[in-house]
Image (cartoon, coloured by chain):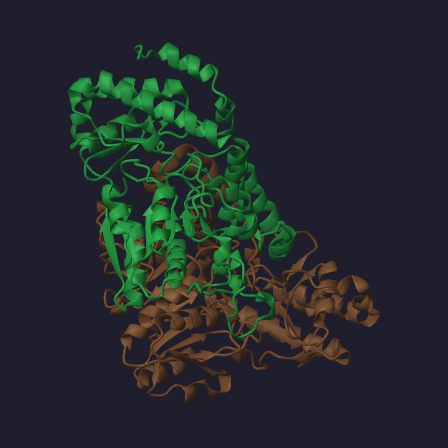
Chain colours: A green, B brown
Amino acid sequence: MAKMTRKKLAEMDRVDPLASFRDEFDLPEGVIYLNGNSLGAMPRAAADRARRVVEHEWAKGLIGSMNTAGWYELPSTLGQKIAPIVGAKPNEVVLTDSTGINLYKVLASALQIRPDRRVVVMEGSNFPTNNYMVQGLLEQLGDGYTIRYAEAENILDAIDDDVAAICITHVHYKTGNILDMAAITDRAHAVGAAAVWDLCHSAGAMPVELNACNVDFAVACTYKYINCGPGSPAILFAAERHHGKFEQPLTGWYGHKAPFNFERDYVPVKDIRQMLSGTQPTVSLSIAEIGIDLMLRADINEIRRKSMRMTECFIELVEERCREFGFELVSPRDSAKRGSQVSFFKEDGYPIVRALHDHGVVCDYRAPGNVRFGFAPLYLRYVDVWDVVDRLRDILSSGSWQGAKYQVRSAVT
Amino acid sequence: MAKMTRKKLAEMDRVDPLASFRDEFDLPEGVIYLNGNSLGAMPRAAADRARRVVEHEWAKGLIGSMNTAGWYELPSTLGQKIAPIVGAKPNEVVLTDSTGINLYKVLASALQIRPDRRVVVMEGSNFPTNNYMVQGLLEQLGDGYTIRYAEAENILDAIDDDVAAICITHVHYKTGNILDMAAITDRAHAVGAAAVWDLCHSAGAMPVELNACNVDFAVACTYKYINCGPGSPAILFAAERHHGKFEQPLTGWYGHKAPFNFERDYVPVKDIRQMLSGTQPTVSLSIAEIGIDLMLRADINEIRRKSMRMTECFIELVEERCREFGFELVSPRDSAKRGSQVSFFKEDGYPIVRALHDHGVVCDYRAPGNVRFGFAPLYLRYVDVWDVVDRLRDILSSGSWQGAKYQVRSAVT
């Protein structure tokens, strides 16, 4: 490949079909934000929406906004909107609660497909909260339920006739490794197991085809690549073929067949709303619509193309310009197997992340030793890739990151 | 009692020690809002807070706001703040998730105090979502767990040696009837059962003394009398003596001993944070602080005094001025036994509620036949009580509520 230059990258920006989306975001001056895989940036329209829902719908509409502003239906109406982003039908998705609580609901449901089996297959190196939630569920269920941990290279082998369900994350939070949703789901179905997927690091960053892959249940985060705002309620997907055929344990009134009849006994509605429990945080939920609308305007194939190109350029530049400083690529080198992030192993990576931050580059660190750079194609430019590597090289060659100020860990990293 | 007049009520407003709080709220012109028991009004400062958290903390601080804006700690810091409002210690409360999901967590925990028992005592006429959540939990637990339904008059009798836990709501959502927290909790403890309370209709409306009553676990809504905003995250209380001695099933990373070590296996932190699961809806959660701060500035005994006086005046005026229209008091007549709402039974009450709405009075209807009027002492005036009854009388005597436009039920009431 010909040597990469900033000029070439600027030319790529000039012809980038997604370039105009950057103006839709309110980004801080001078900052290159490579943490959209933790929290997406703020779409400008979210500010107006926040004002509307607080100062108009809440203050003036008061409880009437449950109807007049559509608050009560938001988990469903936003679920319908967001469905195509994950390859689902509009009646298969709701926006509600947190990813972890949704995982609890969908796995408890999925296990009912094979009540005769007791094994759930998960990646041991997965983002821990998924393991924690499943540990909590299985401990509560008792009766011999266990998790069989596997890693990317042996997941298929781990799926045998003992398996009730797989509970797998599409893109790995540390490495960005993409698992083959179609192949793993097929393998699960071939042995009669249910397939549950977590899309936290793929939804909004690449095409996700839940129905084309025949997935049974799924959850996803909306505050990363879909830019719905901090802690915004999460995606919950249940394939239509399962509707009305399972019970989920968090049986709140939003999942009742007739919630406003105020009947004593729970009777689930036989559609996706069965997955709802209680009243949702309306301000956060309403704002989420802005990120969804923006994402729906973008071509997800263009997002994926840009994401692959950006991460390719980044790896090339780091390996070329920072080679002597011992960054070791953790993410897959093949961009077809890599999500929208690049992680390098660097044992003393934490102070480097702190120093980058002081030089206007926001990325993060996941112990032990993973320096993560997330690339959100809607608001990043190709030249940003150049500039980040430039600043990284400056920091590394000056040794400034070795100063005492960068050694102390903060509470949250 | 001497005949009530608008002038007398205006005089009560003049000397009301809480009168100045009304200016802290942004209330719509011409509306008398008697639905603070569904959704509290907006404190003016909430608008600025919403702008700050969206336009500054999210847009400019991005993921760094987890630390710099204290996002990560909000469930705990707001729990510490809100604790005195329910008579708890600062280390016994978190603000998180929905009331229903919190109920699931605390009851699952409380049942571990008496693992040898299988009965949960609840009010059958309770707000249904509580019954639904407990039905879901007990069905999931299996193993013979059942609910024993009782009503106010026979709850004490229902608590016997078979009972593992009571799960009781302090103030009834339809009638406003207050249950005796101390006596019922004492009875539960006398038979060795755990006491779980729901404070949705009492928190912020009257003194609540969880620790003085020796309550084990509790949940409460923050968007009613505490004015934290639509669907704001809920209160979860666990008495300190139980910390570290139970498992709650929704085991997310926020409840882990060392969440940023990213360990595979769940090890709970041995304090109130064990009750946390996942990332919270930050915008809604941050705004909640405004309502809490406002409530902390008010004397809860004054709130209770005003609430009792307002509901007394309201009952007196309705019975005096609307007697011939067949409104039948459902709420306790003794204000010591009545929460901050008054409900009347009126079989064809729904169109009357709609007509009142068109005349600037917001109250609500709970099938079958309950017309509810909620009195939030922080922003209502005594003269509002007069004016509501005036408008009610006009509607009833003109018969305008019998017009076709008020007969159709909307989706949410």
- Is residue B324 shown to the viewer in this render? yes
Name the spot of residue B397 as percent of width and height, x first: 82, 72
Q: Is residue A365 left or right of residue A83?
A: left
Taking B53 as reference, is A76 above or below it?
below
Taking B140 as reference, is A371 above or below it?
above
Name the spot of residue A287 as percent of width and height, x first: 52, 43
Taking B201 as reference, is A211 above or below it?
above
- Is residue B208 shown to the viewer in this render? no
Q: Quadrant of residue B66?
A: top left
Residue at image position (16%, 24%) is A326
Q: Residue furthest front?
A: A190
Q: Is residue A312 left or right of residue B124?
A: left
Q: Quadrant of residue A49?
A: top right
Q: Between B48 and B353, which is closer to the camera in this rendering?
A: B353
Q: Between B130 and A404, which is closer to the camera in this rendering?
A: B130
Task: Tell me how many marks there are.
Answer: 0
Residue at image position (32%, 12%) is A4
Q: Residue furthest right?
A: B398
Q: Is residue B139 left or right of residue B377?
A: left
Q: Residue furthest bottom?
A: B157
Residue at image position (42%, 34%) is A206
The quarter of the rendered structure image containing the N terminus of chain B is bottom right
Name the spot of residue B379 as percent of width and height, x first: 58, 59
Q: Between A155 and A301, which is closer to the camera in this rendering?
A: A155
Name the spot of residue A258 as percent of width and height, x first: 59, 66
Taking A46 as reference, is B36 above or below it?
below
The quarter of the rendered structure image containing the C terminus of chain B is bottom right
Q: Is residue B314 left or right of residue B183?
A: right
